[in-house]
Image: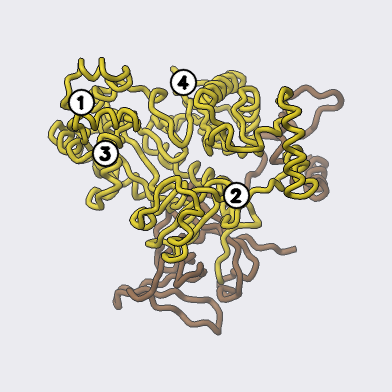
Amino acid sequence: MPLFGLADCNNFFVSCERVFRPDLNGKPVLVLSSNDGCVISRSNEAKALGIKMGVPLFQIRKEVEKYEIALFSSNYVLYGDMSRRVMSLLSCYTPKLDQYSIDEAFIDFSDMGDSKYLQKYGQEIVKSVAKGTGIPISLGIAPTRTLAKVASKFAKKYKGYHGCCIIDTDEKRQKALELFEVGDVFGIGRKIKEHLSKYGIRTAADFARLDGEWVRSAFSITGYRTWRELHGEACISLDELPAKKSICVSRSFAGEGISDRHELEEAIANFASDCARKLREQNTICRQMTVFAYTSRFRTDVPQDFINHNIRLDIGTNETSEIIKTAIEGLRENYRNGNFTYKKAGVILWDIIPANAVQGNLFDPRNRSKLSALQQTIDEINRRNGRGTVRNAVQGDNKLNIKREHLSPQYTTNWDEILVVKG
Amino acid sequence: MEEYSKLSTIAADDIDTSNFATESYNPNALHAGFPSPAQNYMNGTIDLNRVLVRHRETTFFARVEGDTMKDAGIGNGDMVVIDKSLDAKDGDIVVAHLDGEFVLRRLQIDKKQKCAWLLPADSKSKPTKITDGNDLVIWGVVTYTIKKIR
């Protein structure tokens, strides 16, 4: 029986900060978007205070003061490195890991024995990641990706599961769907949810009870596939899953894998190009990129490599050529000596924001048609912020006028900022 | 052979390697001129990471401030290599988060009294008994110390 596991890091950005600030366990914590604009990650305590995802900081100033909420500017370098650690650890537990976003990965558990054994195995994975990296994760295991996501939410919500919830019988599936809001199902967007509520459909079970043919005619093919997935029929591939915080394109290579670096680079270039197209389709840009390539962990007879490299883009972009170039450069920086056969590779774009949200986009030297607009903008900004402000930006100098008042140290990637212990 | 080792000593001391990480160097690329005698030895480079970092995913570094562990050979300014995946055993030097700060101590587990202690290693400081009242997390186990001699 095919079985998918979805490992999802709990409140990932907040959890990264807490690894190095154990004093904040049990306290409300928020991570803010670039420029300290709005909330992008919340601890459970902050959620309980009613603070919503995406809310601008200025709207919750009172609560922050009253409840002494700890604030952090987004430290993407730290989050990227912690993600690499989590993904690398997870890859030790399966011959097939599909990283789906910066903080989620699918683990193939097909034909891995009965569920009693699997429950233990899953809990061991959760425990080893939590202990080794300090990041708490939830693991959902089910016959389809959509159900695995449902299971992971249950694993997160109820302590009794010890981080791992398995939906492997019709009975369990039915019970889980009754308790699950339809709007939280993978692929059910706000529009579909509103549409469904007109018919009194609130839970995933309500949705699953609908007639399949009716679902197919009332919604897109995606809606129908989601319906089938809820019935336990795996029919949505990794690429078809909705992107939220990040866009990921990856592939497992057929047969032995790829050992030629040119071939690997060609594959990465194609993944990068696909990612860039998806970015543009939703009219967004990205400012962080992860490139990964790894050998099979289950071939102990051949040399192993695990490349997982994060790159920060000074200016957000969705341009194909720039994204390809950056991805390839990132890959080349991480080659080690030796002959490796890569089984799996991919590109993830994250820190995704609307294309019109960042001024940096205007400064892009490639954009000739906007030269006059550029000039006007430069003048205006320099008038407001003082001479030379824009000059820095154009040179890609890091002294961009970005507000990061609550930035934590880069504990794991910068010698000057590592942890301090009192001896 | 002797000449090569001399060469590499000079190179290591005199060349600023701070830029090496950002520029990838391809030893197989075509270059005009005399081929590097080091080319055949590229695979044999000693990689300290392979010695000091047993588990890449769960290893972290920290800098020590203070001298309470000096009798255990760890002094102010030293770096410690910490592996979070290891179970702390009696006698291990650990990084603990105690009442709001990270501290470096030796862990002593008293099986008879069913309690544990965090021991300093100098003549002045006092041990801390671990009780339910402490806000304590054993954050990781120290596996190596890096000490600057010169």
Three-letter code, disc 3 = Ala
Which label belongs to residue A151? 3
**Sequence-earlier tag: 3 or 2:** 3
**Sequence-earlier tag: 3 or 1:** 3
Which residue is label 1 attached to? A231
Quarter holding residue A175: top left
| Mark 3–mark 1 distance (CA, rounded to whole Å) | 14 Å
- Residue A370 in picture, x, y percent from top left: 71, 26
| Mark 1–mark 4 distance (CA, rounded to whole Å) | 30 Å
Q: Secondary structure at mark 1?
A: loop
Confirm or deny contact between disc 3 and disc 2 (CB under 8 A): no
Which residue is label 4 attached to? A253
Q: Is residue A98 left or right of residue A175?
A: right
**Sequence-earlier tag: 4 or 3:** 3
Give the colour of chain A. yellow
Between label 1 and label 2, give the one nearer the viewer.
Answer: 1
